[in-house]
Image (tube, grey):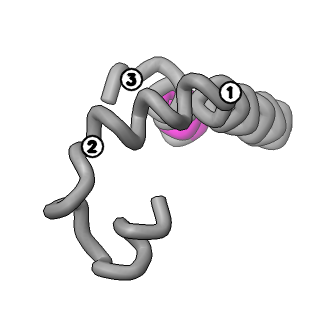
Amino acid sequence: MATVLRHGNYDRVPLASILALMERHGGIARARQRAQDFTERARAIISTLPDSSYQRALYTMTELVTEREY
């Protein structure tokens, strides 16, 4: 990670190595949980809005944050 931060790119360190390090130390799971927490908070706020196509669109956007695979 220090190499990536020092050089500002992934040219010297394969992204797969960084992902493996993050997985090994629980970083990915923590990030997913944090995203889920924010999604739940957003949904609670959105649910207070009047039912409309705009409200449903906002709700759908929250799904994109936590359901996507990339």
Q: In this view, does 2 lie above or below 56?
A: below
Residue 24 x, y percent position in the rendering? 59, 24
Viewer-nearest residue: 53 or 26? 26
Query: Left of 13 or right of it: where is 60?
Result: right
Q: Extreme left residue here?
A: 11
Q: Which residue is drawn at 54% across and 39% down?
A: 58
Query: Left of 40 or right of it: where is 22?
Result: left
Q: Give the mark nearer the N terminus: 2 vs 1.
A: 2
Residue 68 got which mark?
3
Q: Residues within 10 Å of mark 1 (few under 14, many from 20)?
A: few
Q: Which amino acid does label 1 sit on?
A: Gly
Residue 56 falls within the magenta-colored stretch: yes
- The answer to whether marks 2 and 3 mark residues whose Cβ atoms lie closer than 8 Å is no
Q: Which residue is drawn at 36% across and 67% down?
A: 4
Residue 35 got which mark?
none
Looking at the rendering, the stretch of residues picked out in magenta corresponds to: 55-60
Viewer-nearest residue: 20 or 49? 20
Q: How far apart are marks 2 and 3 (CA)?
A: 19 Å
Tell me how many marks there are.
3
| Occupied quadrant, residue 14 | top left
Q: How crowded is mark 3: few (under 14 residues within 10 Å), some or many (20 or more)?
A: few
- In this view of the protein, can residue 32 be seen by the observer? yes
Q: Give the mark nearer the N terminus: 1 vs 3.
A: 1
Please name the residue that numbered disc 2 is placed on: 15
Residue 48 x, y percent position in the rendering? 84, 37
* SS label for mark 3: loop
Please name the residue that numbered disc 1 is placed on: 26
- The answer to whether marks 2 and 1 mark residues whose Cβ atoms lie closer than 8 Å is no
Residue 52 x, y percent position in the rendering? 58, 32
Q: What residue type is labelled 3?
A: Arg
- In this view of the protein, can residue 52 be seen by the observer? no
Viewer-nearest residue: 52 or 42? 42
